[in-house]
Amino acid sequence: MTVLPPRERFAAAEAGAIALLVHRMAGAGEVVVGSAPATRAFADVPFVPVPPALFALGTMGRYRAGVARLVGSIRPDLVEVHNRPDLALAISRRFPHMPLVLVLHNDPCGMRGAKTARERTVLAGKMAVVAVSGWLRARFLAQGAQGCVTVLPNALDLAALPAPAPVRDRTVLFAGRVVADKGVDAFVAACAALLPRYPTWQATIIGADRFGPASPQTDFLARLQEQARVAGVSMAGYQPHAQVLQAMSQAAIVVVPSRWAEPFGMAALEAMGCGAAVLTSRNGGLPEVAGQAALYASPDDLPGMVAALERLMADVTLRAHLGQAGLARARLFDSAVLRPERQIFQARVVQVWPHVSRLVQG
């Protein structure tokens, strides 16, 4: 059984990054549980909505109680909880003999139940802990926390990606949340400096403040829209994931200029899998994903970002080289490769349970 965070929805029109990954990696016999989506759930993976719990306190309390009811009724061989240490702890207390895995997609040091080294040490003693990058593993073990943390990276389904365009558009693309942490303002500033010198090129932003068509208009977004208008950068707003991938398969360059420490860097991996030349930052897990298959620049070093982006815009041979290198690197993260590794890991958890310290650290 795989348990989604309560805000994730297991449906094509509503799925966030975690739900998409869970759908991509689901194996035979796996059942996914989570909040009921407003649209039809993915049809190819069994899904059970978390039932309402009338007597629990608070939204999260009701969700925990509903998940516990499902664990008790389904009695799976293993429970995998995504990104909610507090929920994993609640399941551990209720079902101490149930093999349990906690998969972390974000920095645990800011999560309820994992903020201190002592809390994280307790977590690692009660369940198998997985981090999607080495950077996240280091964050879990920061400040002297003890325990086994296995790295199992996020996966990409290369077979489901659109084919890279044989002749790519002269487009510089940003695709992601339109917030300062993602460096989108640095993207606009770099494009403002370069587009007048490269009149055959265009720049596009796909995304909004958050995922979904109902994303709000924020002060940051309003300011950026004016800056983009002046710079000649088009803003397409939120688009479904399939359309984002299609745009990545056609754009010559995809820029992932994150300021914050990306726990993994899925946008960079998707862009490489779609054959684009990638320019990204070195923050968080991004270098683990991109390796030598991208150019790097800091979003807070505008001259450096302009220089790196101009290298790509001016050099078709470099773009082709990085596009091929990115495709080769993306194959390392293909779900066809990583799904069996996950299944082997889960089987090992069941085998050694409850002695999770016997797991091999990733």
Image: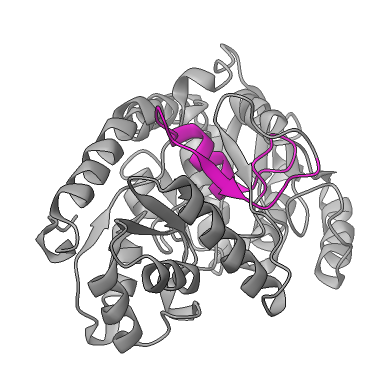
Residue 147 location, quadrant: bottom left
Whether residue 35 is in magenta: the answer is yes
Q: Position of residue 189 (x, y in %)?
A: 70, 59
> Quick check: can you spot residue 2?
yes
Q: Magenta span covers which residues? A: 9-38
Q: Main secondary structure of the magenta part?
A: loop
Question: In the image, is 212 to the left or to the right of 124?
Answer: right
Q: Is residue 210 left or right of residue 10?
A: right
The vertical placement of 184 against 172, above or below, is: below
Whether residue 348 is situated above or below residue 334 in the rendered picture: below
Q: Nearer the viewer, residue 169 or 161?
A: 161
Q: Write the residue at 66% across / 69% down.
A: 62
In this view, the residue in front, 89 or 273, is 89
Q: Quadrant of residue 264?
A: bottom left
Residue 322 drawn at (x, y percent)? 41, 31
Q: Percent from the top left, x then y, of residue 126?
A: 28, 71
> Taking 155 as reference, is 215 above or below it?
below
